[in-house]
Each structure stands twice: as structure tokens, then as C-alpha cells.
Amino acid sequence: MAKLANKTGSEELPHPMENVKPDNWQDKFEGRVKSKFVDPCDRAAKASLECMNRNDYDRNQCLDFFQAYRDCKKDWLDQRNADRRAGRVKA
């Protein structure tokens, strides 16, 4: 089956390593609606889904994007836990 080039858009996907570092989680949580899910790694998640869309859901083509998301999520959770232990949590 032939792959369709740029099925969902003409913009270039960001390099996976650009999304490894999570956004500041405290800034993301501040001012949010109480029931809304907030993810500082949403850019990495969206990039990995976009990669899957552009590559006909061939997971092997997007492994770098998946790893970038896992690294981002791990860094975010580690930072959040460190902030809680240090008493730096605002909410």
C-alpha cells in the first residue's frame, strides 16, 4: 500500500527531541478549569499522533516521537514529585 505524503497538513513535524522537555507544569495548572485535564507534554503527544496520521499508522516510523513523549512525561512527573517534596506546590 502506497503512503500518502502529508495526509493531514503541509507543516513539518517538530524534531522529536524538541518535545522531550515538558512545559512548566505549575504554569499549565494555574488558571485551569478544575475538571480540565492538563498535560505539560501535550506538544509531544500531538506530534506523535500527527506522525502516526502521516505515516498510515506505521508505528515503526514514529518510535522517536513515542520515546520523546515518554521522556517528557517522566521528566514532568519527576519534577512534580520533587516540587511536592520540597513544598513548592501552589495548588
Image (cartoon, rainbow, N blue to C red):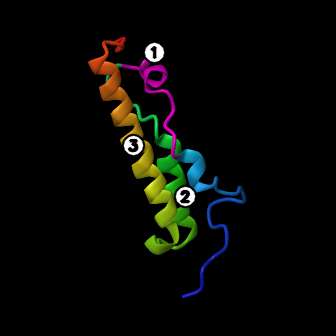
Mark 2, residue position: 50
Q: Residues within 10 Å of mark 1 (few under 14, many from 20)?
A: few
Q: Which of marks 1 and 2 precedes in the sequence? A: 1
Q: Residue 59 location in percent, x, y?
A: 44, 71
Residue 26, quarter of picture: top left
Residue at the (47%, 66%) spot, across then down: 63
From the viewer's perspective, is residue 87 above or below residue 55?
Answer: above
From the viewer's perspective, is residue 58 above or below residue 26?
Answer: below
Disc 3 from disc 1: Cα separation: 21 Å
Mark 1, residue position: 31
Front label number (3 vs 1): 3
Q: Can residue 37 be seen in this view?
A: no
Q: Residue 28 location in percent, x, y?
A: 47, 25
Q: How crowded is mark 2: few (under 14 residues within 10 Å), some or many (20 or more)?
A: some
Q: Which amino acid does label 3 sit on?
A: Lys
Quadrant of the image for the N terminus? Answer: bottom right
Boundaries of the magenta span: 20-33
Q: Residue 66 location in percent, x, y?
A: 44, 58
Mark 3, residue position: 73
Residue at the (49%, 27%) spot, across then down: 24
Q: Which amino acid does label 1 sit on?
A: Gly
